[in-house]
Amino acid sequence: MAEIRKASLVSAVCFTLSILIYAVVSLILGTVMVPRDVLLIALMFVVIGVINYIRLLIRHTRWGMSKSLFIRNIIAAPIYFAVGVGFATLILGFWSLSTVLFLASIFLPVFIVIQTVMYFIAKAKTDKMNEALSDFMKEHGGDEEE
Amino acid sequence: MKLFLRQCPQVEETEVEVRYREKTREIDNLVQAINQSADTIMGIKGNGDTELIYISDILYFEAVDRDIFAYKAQDVYRIRKTLYELEEDLRDRFFVRISRSTIVNIKAVRSVAPEDSRRVKLLLKNGEYVLVSRNYVNDFKRAIGMKEGKHG
């Protein structure tokens, strides 16, 4: 239940932001917001919400817990990209393969770099905790049994 | 009440058997006294049998709905205490609260790894992972002796 709530909340926030961006862009370009596009954007976030929900479920499995956040995000990135490209094609019209590949060549490396940086920042903190844990075990005689 | 003490060199672990006609308050007190005399806690197995568990063997306690469970490397026991009581009782025995529903044995933690939403996950000695909630990360850090300036 908590997973559904969390996945829905993320989708709702992202949907609201995307509608706001769409509205601002429409205002700048002097175009009108097409109801069909708004519905497609809503549908896209429903799909993303379902993916997020599945990810949250997988995260609590033994496999999910054994994989780092970085790996799990890298695995999910192409799925999000495919959904994004799919709905963008429906909204903006057909995209050629070269356009999709061009976008993928930008999105995926940028995503990987951001994830790598975030992972190493988080890891630096847990490295300090591992150091403290090791000191704790030396001091208090950690359970050596495996 | 008769008390028999028998030395048995062949037993691997001290055994206490209480034989009673009827479970009275006296029996309950006796069990409680035995429970308190050692570093143990009374656990109820899936089949309803009760067993004294060594605190040091417990990896973590978890609240599931209204029940509290103690997890050893292989076995799971239901515990007749609240998480709050356990937290108080085990504070000096290297147990720390890591989420609203979990208390972990620090000595059973093998490593710490980052997770999303400023949480961390702990790898336990049996290969299982438990999550430290964002609100309890500082409690865990304090419990393992991290101080401002020493480990960041």
Image (cartoon, grey):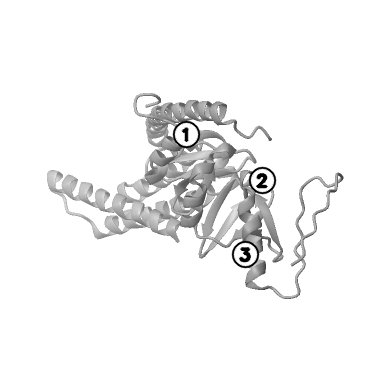
A120 left or right of B46?
Answer: left
Q: How many numbered marks, from 0 up?
A: 3
Earlier-in-chain disc, 1 versus 2: 2
User: Do the dots labelled 3 and 1 sit on one chain?
Assistant: yes
- In this picture, is B152 found above or below B57? above
Question: What quarter of the picture does the N terminus of chain A occupy?
Answer: bottom left
Q: CA distance from mark 3 to mark 2?
A: 29 Å
- According to the picture, the residue beneath numbered tag 1 turns out to be B144
The 10 Å Cα crowd at callout 2, few under 14, some 14 to 19, many 20 or more, is some
Q: CA distance from mark 1 to mark 2?
A: 21 Å
The 10 Å Cα crowd at callout 1, few under 14, some 14 to 19, many 20 or more, is many
- Give, as a three-letter code, the residue at label 2: Ala
- According to the picture, the residue beneath numbered tag 2 turns out to be B73
Earlier-in-chain disc, 3 versus 1: 3
- Secondary structure of the residue carrying tag 3 is helix
Residue B69 is situated, as x and y percent measured from the top left of the image, at 58, 57
Outermost residue on the front side: it is B2
Tag shown at residue B29: 3
